[in-house]
Amino acid sequence: MKRKSNFIVAGMLISLAMSNTLPVLSIDIHAADDSKQGAVIVGKEDKKYQTISEAVKKASANDTIKVYPGIYPEKIDITKNNLKIVGEDGAIIGNAENKQTVKPDEDGEALLQIKGKNIEISNLEFANYKLKGPSDSVCPKAIDIDGPSDHITISNCKIHDVGVVYTDGSEEYNAHGIIAGASPSKPITDITITGCELYNLTLGQSEALVVNGNVDKFNITKNYIHDCDNIAIDAIGYERDKNNEKDRAHNGEISENTVINISSKNNAAYGGDISAGGIYVDGGYDINIHDNYVQGADIGIEVSSEHRKKTVTGVKVHDNVLVNNDGWAGICIGGSDPSENGDAANNQIYNNTVYNTKNACLRIQNAHNNQNLIQKNIFIATDSAKAYSEECGKNSSGNTVNQNISNVKMSPSGNSTFKLKAASTTNMTLEVASSDDLSGYGASRTKFVK
C-alpha cells in the first residue's frame, strides 16, 4: 500500500559500501592519467570525450559508449535510438560521498533520462543524489525511462543513496531508483530491468523500481533490492488518467528477484504507517509474479488497486518464498478501504510458501470475486501470526480459497499436517517437515523433509 501523491509518477541484509577513493573525472583531456578516465565511443578510432553526455551527443546509430572508472557529476539525456552504454567497474554517475555537485531540480530530476528505441545501459553505478527537504515539483531519480520508447534494457547497474533527505513531517517527498513511466498516448514497450542492485534509497511516497502507466511487455528479473523505506517493485495503473484503460502497466513478468528489508517505518512521509510492499501491483493487469524471495518487508506481495471502482486483474502470484513480512501480511489482495480504494478480480495466488511470525500470512481486503483463486499455498504461522485474515467484512468474501495447507487451523480451509523445520536465507528456501505427501503444494523451492 502507498499513500496518494501529488506526483503523477508513483511510489539487503548487507549494504555494500561505495569506495570513495575512485578518481574524479578530470576536465583536462591532457591530464597524465587521462587514459584511465572519460568516455570512449568504441569503433570510432576510440575517440575520447570529457563527459558521458558529450559522447552521447556525438554518437551515431549502433555505437557503443565505453565509460571508464571515475565519478561523473552530470545528468545524461538520451533522445536518440540504437545506442549502448557500458561502464567499467567503478564508473559512477552522480556525486562523491558527502559532496553533491550535481543536484536534482525542476530542469533535470534524473541522473539518466531515456527516450528512444533500442537502448542498452549496463554496469553503471548511480550514487549520492538526493533532494533535501519536501517538494511538490521535484522527484529525484537515478534512471527515468519516458515514453514513447521501446526495447530498453537496464542491466547489472547499481543504484544507492538516492532519494530525499527528510527535514519535516510533510507528505511531499518523492523519489525513484528506476522508473519507466508512460502516458496513454506515448507508450513504453519491451522493457527489461535485470541483474541490478538498488539499496539505501529514501523514497518518500514513491518506489525503488516502478513501471507506471502504459508500459507494455516488461521484464523485471534477478534484481536485488534491499534496505529501502518504501515499495521495492511496483506496477501501477490509473495514476495519470483513471478513466483510460491504457493507463495501466500490463503484460509483464516480475521474477527471480530478491527483496529484503523494505519498510516505511522510518519514512517521514508515512507518519509512522508500516505498509511498504516488497512487490506490489497497483491497478496493473496481466502480470506474472513468480520465483521471487521477499523477506522483511511490511507486505511481501500485494495485489490491489488504490483507485475507487478500479480493479486489478489478471495477476498471477506463484512459486514465491515469503519470509517474515510481518508488518501487515505475507500476501495481501484487494484495496485496504472499500470506500476509497478499488478491488481485485480474476487473479490467481497459488503454490507460494509464506512464513510469518506476526499479523497474517494471507490477508484478504477489498476482494470479493470467485475468480480470485487462492490455492495450494503453504501458510506457516507462528507466534502471534494468523494464517488467514479477512479485513473488510463482506468485501473480503466470495473468493475461491481452497486446497491450501497451514500448520494451524485456518478458515475457510487448511489443516495441521506439518511444521517448519528451517528457513535458509542463503539458499532462499524453507524446509518443511511433514509425514504427509505435500508435493504440489507451496513454492518450488520449498524442501520437504521427514
Image: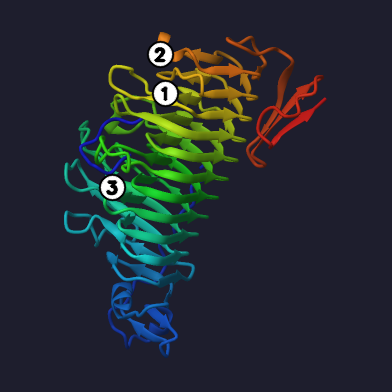
- Please state, as top left, top right, bottom left or bottom right, where the N terminus lies in the image: top left
Q: CA distance from mark 1 to mark 3?
A: 24 Å
Q: Is residue 392 visible?
A: no
Q: Position of residue 367 (x, y in %)?
A: 43, 20
Quarter of the image holding residue 7?
top left
Residue positioned most to the bottom: 45
The amino acid sitting under disc 2 is Asn
Q: CA distance from mark 1 to mark 2?
A: 9 Å
Q: Are the residues at dot 1 and dot 2 in contact (C-beta closer than 8 Å)?
A: yes
> Which residue is found at the position 33% from the left and 73% from the top?
52
Of callouts 1 and 3, the N-terminal one: 3
Q: Dot 1: within a 10 Å radius of its alpha carbon, few (fewer than 14), some, or many (20 or more) residues?
A: many
- SS type, badge 2: helix
| Above-or-below relation of 406 to 235 | above
Q: Position of residue 162 (x, y in %)?
A: 34, 50
410 vs 369, nearest the viewer? 369
Left or right of 244: which side holds 303? right
Q: Position of residue 388 (x, y in %)?
A: 54, 15
Of callouts 2 and 3, the N-terminal one: 3
Label 2: which residue? 395
- SS type, badge 3: loop
Label 3: which residue? 184
| Above-or-below relation of 91 to 14 | below
